[in-house]
Amino acid sequence: MNTAKIVLGVLVLVLSLSFAATLTPGPVTTCGVIDTLGTYNVQNNLTAATGDCIVIQADDVNLNCDANSISATSRSSYAIHVMEGSGNVHVDRCILENSMTGLGAGGLDSDTNGLTLTANVARHNGWGYELIRLTNSMIDDNMAYNNTEHGFYMTASTGNTLQNNNEFMSEWNGFYLGSSSNNHLVGNTASQNRNGGTSVGFEIAFDSNSNTLESNTAEQNDFGFKLYGSTPVGGVTPALPDGNRFISNTANDNGIGIQFMYTGTQNGISGSTITNNAYGGIDALGSPALDITSNTITNNGPSYSLASGILVKNCTGYVISDNTVTASYNGVWVEASNMGTLDNTVISGSVSPLRLEFSTGNQLTAITVADSGPVMLRGDSTDNSITLLTMKGTAGEVLVDIPVYNGNYDVTVASSPAAAPSGYTALGRYVSVVEAVAPPVPDEGMELVIHYQDSDLGSLSESTVKAMLWDGSWSIPAQTLYMSTNGVITDNTAFGIFGLFARPTPPTPPTPPTPPSGGSTGGTTSGGSGGGAPHIGVPYIPSGSGGTTVEVEPSCTSNADCASSATCSGGVCKALEAGSSCGTFENHKWVDYECCGTEDCDAGQVCKNNACVSMEPLNITGTEPQGTGGSEASGSNQGLGRLLADVPWWVLLLLVLMVGGGIYARYRMGQSEKPPEGSEGSEEMPPAEPEEE
């Protein structure tokens, strides 16, 4: 506030009061002093020859000018002056003009409480309305225009409401609140305030706390809205405004729509429309814990390279959420700001839609960039995380995460630079990552996640999805490559255009025939009873396939991801060929067996566990081998069984015939020695008598 102006005004007031008439309730036809409560009605235009025209120094005064003009010819005087300490004063329908101040109320020593100003007009003054130490007052439906200083100037005031007032064409500020708290400005308009770059539609300055500006309109000013604190100079403690809220305001056609500069904490703007401002929509400089939520920001400096829809610089702990930013040169620019959050914001039609530099520990998520240039990530920014960044335009659409980066990169959606590599089908998701021209950054690199939709796959195999880099041909990046949920993650130090590809889902192979029961287990081909059956996981040629080997090629990064009968090559499992007719695959190599059946062994050997072993000697004693149980399948029967298993059939037949013939001959001999039926073989025969000689 201008202290010299106040001292001069007080001096003029003292002199003018010495000669002013005292007014009484009722009709007023001349300038004077009101020191008695009551209602006063101005009957005609009033002009003070010297000093103030009407001075009110009483409580409970109602002054109605009935649209008559009140003026003080001296440029150091007030048209109407409500003295400090006066309470419950009402001033209605006065035209306040050609004075130092149209209407002044209050002073530095005591509060002025309960002032009501309604339907007044302040024009062609220095200050339109100057309000000092005002409390619990209502400033409603007034107008101020063509004043050389401020339209509405309020300082050291608390708990007041300014509503539905209209201000325009002041050389400084339309509405100014300095060191004032808990005031409510609603439905006011400030327009056409310009003095070459510093005029503001609505300014809240210094230690002004917890004010609410709601549904106000600022148009064609140097700044539409401004929240401003002082900086620490010469050891002086700065005065910083805290907890001020800008809600559902409109800032159109200004130099800058709204600016937060050197503020305290917990200030914010929400639900506002900020359009066609030449040098930026929302600028925040040195304003910690600032909340920028649910605003519509359109066409702010589309051709000015330093203009942004939203700029946060030197702001810690900011929150930018649910905003729509369209057609600004820089959509959202975060510079030298740490530990902030940017989410659920749509940016379109910007040369640089998202710019992040010299900032640390920021979380950016669910951001959509459409029909714009590249996202600009710049060096000296660490521990920032970008998730669910959707980029779309004429080239297509892609969803990416950038959990980690270090370096200078331009990232944007891209179109396909070439056809898909042989054996693969493109998923239609491409992203360009270009290393920007900037000083080199140590340990530069980027972790990039490229997402895809289930609908992208169609008949393609999800297990074969690959991210490939185009550098004249498609190749899988050499860095770590692995899958996430509907995404492919790759760590990169080489850059270009990345695309997603997958192979068709392979046909289901025929069910292998069931091996016959019994016999030894054969190898992969015939050999031994039960051999020749294909093993699960081993390539084979099914009947009726025309000699085509059936195999499945799953995605892999090492041999450990493949069946034992395959190796990992080029990201897919490739089947190995059998080395012989008898053997198996072990640890991704072919291992030959010594035998798959006894016919593969020498005479006197049998095939046991795919190895030829000597036959055990035949036990024909009929006794049990020592240390065994006494079952029928042991002893000589076991030895005989092992022997017979390897004796040719015709030898066995001869043995059967020989043994059978012997048994039959013995039977016939026994029949000839048997006494005839009916003989008494049990009686002794009498001794034979000697023959006669």
Image (tube, grey):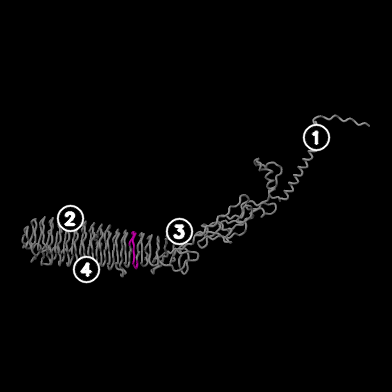
Q: Which circle's residue, 3 or 4, is located before the other in the chain?
A: 4
> Does the segment drawn in magenta span residue 414?
no
**Residue 545 at x, y = what percent?**
57, 60
Indicate the amino acid at tag 3.
Met
- The answer for how far apart the CA atoms under marks 1 and 3 are is 100 Å
Could you classify mark 3 by the number of other residues whose Cα lies within 10 Å: few (under 14), some (14-19), or many (20 or more)?
Answer: some
Q: Is residue 302 left or right of residue 21?
A: right
C-alpha separation, residue under disc 1 versus residue under disc 2? 153 Å
For label 4, the residue is: 194
Q: Give the CA separation, mark 3 to mark 4.
A: 58 Å
**Which dot marks residue 483?**
3
Which structural element holds mark 4?
loop
Image quarter of the N terminus: bottom left
Q: Nearer the viewer, mark 2 or mark 3?
A: 3
Question: Which sits earlier in the primary sequence, circle 1 or circle 3?
Answer: 3
Q: Please indicate, yes or no, whether residue 408 appears anywhere in the rendered image.
A: no
Q: Which residue is mark 2?
A: 136
